[in-house]
């Protein structure tokens, strides 16, 4: 059973059109041109704060048929771009995940074993570059599907009745536990607190779009989820919960060998957090894992200096 997705998609389209710093748009356009993308999404803390410091987070969505279920995606890379400011040149840094839009859409709809796409993109993101109106519409539909997938699981895992935040907390707690995460306990509360405007009113809209009627009494929501439907959703979730950590481990292994620009990214992180400059030699650029022990030894010695 499905409802009318139009109101949810209208809200998502407005959210995706959120203004961002022109430097972010220019960076996205350059990434799109180099990769032949259909669309580029911008997300993470820099979207919320508007800051250009640290590392910007992008998702590049490519044309083509969806990758097979056995393919480990996305491909992760690190990029730098010079940006002119009133005080001179500033280096912008970005961590970029790349995958096909068709795969992104399937993952957002919950059709794949993956949990990361719909759990990530029910949170705020901005569509900072699109090849054409069709690409923009496809991304909007996929993000709306991510919201419906997340909301459906929130209804199944959450209380019979409760405030919207009760359902969201239950959802994010469950998805974090299903993955290898380094976030501290209670991260779900931080997500809801800093993105309060984004989540306000989103849950009932996503339920209705996904065919789950909901009644409201003040802030208390009651989704009409029959027992059989809850059982189907929980069975769907049980497989994804079991596969969450193995899939994340495979992605970490892949990233350790295919992370383009890993040495430059690590060097910047080390210097930023420790003050120790790290020279990116050709060897370290080509073999970051082999170079890591020496860098870690140097870092240990640097920290022991009086």
Image (spheres, rainbow, N blue to C red):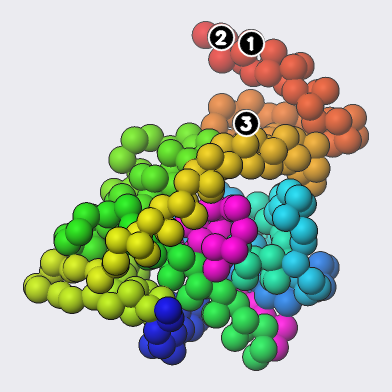
Say the numbered circle drawn on residue 270.
3
* Mark 2 crowd level (few <14, some 14–19, many ≥20, 10 Å Cα): few
Rendering coords of residue 288 (x, y %): 80, 31
Q: Is residue 125 magenta?
A: yes
Could you tell which of marks 3 and 2 lies nearer the N-terminus? 3
Rendering coords of residue 119 (x, y %): 47, 57
Report the residue marked by disc 1. 301
In the rendered structure, the answer to whether residue 245 lies left or right of residue 49 reads right
In the rendered structure, the answer to whether residue 145 lies left or right of residue 184 reads right
Q: CA distance from mark 3 to mark 2?
A: 15 Å
- Residue at left offset 54%, top offset 32%: 273
Report helix, strand or loop for mark 3: helix
- Residue at left offset 53%, top offset 36%: 180
Whether the residues at callouts 1 and 2 have beta carbons within 8 Å, the answer is yes
Rendering coords of residue 95 (x, y %): 65, 52
Say the numbered circle drawn on residue 304.
2
């Amino acid at each position: 059973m499905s409802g009318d997705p139009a109101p949810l998609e209208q809200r998502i389209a407005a959210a995706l059109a959120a203004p961002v710093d022109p430097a972010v748009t220019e960076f996205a356009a350059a990434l799109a041109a180099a990769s032949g993308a259909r669309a580029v999404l911008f997300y993470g803390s820099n979207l919320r704060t508007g800051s250009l410091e640290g590392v910007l987070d992008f998702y590049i969505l490519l044309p083509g048929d969806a990758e097979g279920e056995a393919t480990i995606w996305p491909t992760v890379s690190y990029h730098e771009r010079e940006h002119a400011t009133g005080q001179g040149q500033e280096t912008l840094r970005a961590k970029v995940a790349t995958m096909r839009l068709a795969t992104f859409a399937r993952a957002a709809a919950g059709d794949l074993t993956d949990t990361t796409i719909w759990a990530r993109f029910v949170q705020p993101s901005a569509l900072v570059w699109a090849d054409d109106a069709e690409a923009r519409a496809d991304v909007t539909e996929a993000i709306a599907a991510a919201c419906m997938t997340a909301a459906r699981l929130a209804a199944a895992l959450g209380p019979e009745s409760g405030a919207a935040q009760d359902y969201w907390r239950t959802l994010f707690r469950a998805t974090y536990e299903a993955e290898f995460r380094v976030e501290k306990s209670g991260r779900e509360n931080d997500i809801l607190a800093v993105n309060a405007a984004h989540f306000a009113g989103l849950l009932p809209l996503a339920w209705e779009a996904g065919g789950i009627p909901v009644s409201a009494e003040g802030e208390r929501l009651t989704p009409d989820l029959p027992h059989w439907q809850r059982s189907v959703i929980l069975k769907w979730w049980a497989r994804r919960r079991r596969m969450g950590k193995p899939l994340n481990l495979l992605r970490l292994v892949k990233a350790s060998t295919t992370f383009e620009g890993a040495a430059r990214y690590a060097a910047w992180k080390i210097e930023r957090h420790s003050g120790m400059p790290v020279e990116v030699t050709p060897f370290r650029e080509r073999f970051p894992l082999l170079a890591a022990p020496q860098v870690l030894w140097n870092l240990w010695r640097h920290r022991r200096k009086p």
